[in-house]
Amino acid sequence: MAIYKLQNEFLTLTLESYGAEMQSILTKDGVELLYQGGEDWKGKAPNLYPIVGYLPERKYIYEGKEYGIGGHGVARINDYVVESQSDTEIVFLLTQNEETLKQYPFNFEFRVKYVLNGKKVEYVLTATNTDSKTSYCEIGVHPGFPAPLGFEGVKFQFDSEEKYYTVKNLDSEK
């Protein structure tokens, strides 16, 4: 596990290679923008792949074999390598390994890219199937942000409409 920092004139973003997870988003004024966890939530901003949430009984059957998989999949519980890095951008890469294959029997590349762009943190997840067989997956993020107790008077506003992509392999429908 290693710690990385990205900085620009507005923000310092601290990241951990384990889970490719954000650890801190600090303004130049010293305000922490990322929830720092606690007894109620151990993580800070886990990346979710190949599932979002939990499967019934935390297991599934693929090609006649049963696989156990924990909540939110394997992305949050593995160490990543850094594929590229600059002062304001980093790309983490996770590929299959002995442990991921026990839970998710596919070859893959899962990238997590962070970019500091002014006062924004741009966050892009990309899953690529590098296997010869069709793989099934979901991807997501789960950052926490501090807010006043009870959320009274709190409003979240986004710059644009959220983009959601669904990829369907038409060959599998035959």
Image: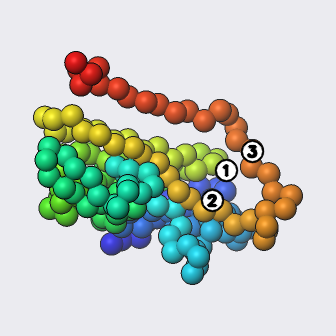
- Asked whether 23 or 141 is in front, the reply is 141
- Asked whether 169 or 15 is in front, the reply is 169
Give the image location of residue 148, x and y in percent. Answer: 79, 68
Mark nearest the camera among 3 and 1 is: 3
33 to the left or right of 16 = right
Q: CA distance from mark 2 to mark 3?
A: 19 Å
Secondary structure of the residue carrying tag 2 is: strand
Q: Which colour assignment does the render follow?
A: rainbow
Q: Quadrant of the C terminus?
A: top left
Secondary structure of the residue carrying tag 3 is: loop
80 to the left or right of 26 = left
Q: Residues within 10 Å of mark 2 (few under 14, many from 20)?
A: many
Precedes in sequence: disc 2 or disc 3:
2
- Asked whether 11 or 109 is in front, the reply is 109
Q: Residues within 10 Å of mark 1 (few under 14, many from 20)?
A: few
Asked whether disc 1 touches disc 2, contact meaning CB atoms under 8 Å apart, the reply is yes
59 to the left or right of 132 = right
Give the image location of residue 58, x and y in percent. Answer: 34, 61
**In the drawing, what numbered circle is on residue 157?**
3
Given the current orientation, which residue lies at the most extreme right position?
Answer: 153
- Please tell me which residue is depicted at 55% across the width and 46% down the height of the picture: 122
Q: Which residue is mark 2?
A: 11
Q: Which residue is mark 1?
A: 119
Give the amino acid at mark 3.
Answer: Gln
Secondary structure of the residue carrying tag 1 is: loop
The relative height of residue 6 versus residue 106 in the rendered view (above or below) is below
Q: Residues within 10 Å of mark 3 (few under 14, many from 20)?
A: few
Q: Is residue 7 visible?
A: no
Q: CA distance from mark 1 to mark 2?
A: 7 Å
